[in-house]
Amino acid sequence: TGIALGLSLAGSWLEGLPDLDDPTAFSVAQTTKIYSADGGLLANLYLENRQVVPLDQISPNLLHAVVAVEDERFYQHNGVDIPGVVRAAVTNLTTGRTEGASTLTMQYIRNTVLADDPERFQTSYRRKAREAVLALELEKQYSKDALLAMYINTVYYGEGAYGAEAA
């Protein structure tokens, strides 16, 4: 009975997941540049100050730093970091303090395809399960370097800067 209830609950959490094959699923706002007739930049217009750039235009030092700080086992897992999940669960249960276990891929999912999810800024098992399932699927479709580039171009770095180029 417990297993059936658990599976039913998990199934309800995964209802209505976004389609990762939708070409607009990972669209992010970018800066619009307005130029004069002679080519001079007149203005930058944006909701989110972001300019998407390829991975080879991003400092390797920044790439290494992001992986080291945000997801040290990024190149070893398949979208879900099981040791990280276990560590977070033990910390949450033993200290009462909430600790996350989101991988770079899960964070990217939360900031793009799940950006309109009302639970986006709440810590819930439902949200984590949805992120995990989508991260596992996304990691089947893209290389680690492609995923890192997508993450680096999406994340908020502070002071109104989204993505590495704006930061």
Image (spheres, rainbow, N blue to C red):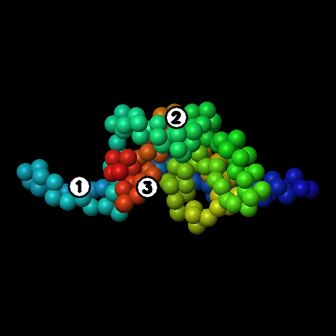
Identified at 27% across, 61% down, the residue is 45
Q: Which mark is residue 33?
A: 1
> Which comes before the other along the chain, label 1 or label 2?
1
Q: Where is residue 31 in the image (x, y as percent from the top left)?
A: 30, 55
Residue 149 relative to residue 86: left or right? left
Identified at 54% across, 45% down, the residue is 70
Q: Label 2 is placed on what type of residue? A: Lys
Disc 2: which residue: 144
Disc 3: which residue: 156
Q: Which mark is residue 15?
A: none
Instruction: Give the alpha-carbon distance from disc 2 to disc 3, as whole Å.
Output: 20 Å
Number of marks? 3
Marks 2 and 3: CB-CB under 8 Å?
Answer: no
Q: In the picture, residue 54 is in which quadrant? A: top left
Q: Label 3 is placed on what type of residue? A: Tyr
Q: Where is residue 98 in the image (x, y as percent from the top left)?
A: 67, 59
Identified at 36% across, 38% down, the residue is 58
Residue 29 relative to residue 81: left or right? left
Residue 113 relative to residue 49: left or right? right
Which quadrant does the N terminus fall into?
Answer: bottom right
Q: Is mark 1 on a helix, strand or loop?
A: strand
Identified at 52% across, 59% down, the residue is 115
> Which comes before the other along the chain, label 2 or label 3?
2
Is residue 165 visible from the viewing direction of this image? yes
Is 142 situated above or below 93?
Answer: above
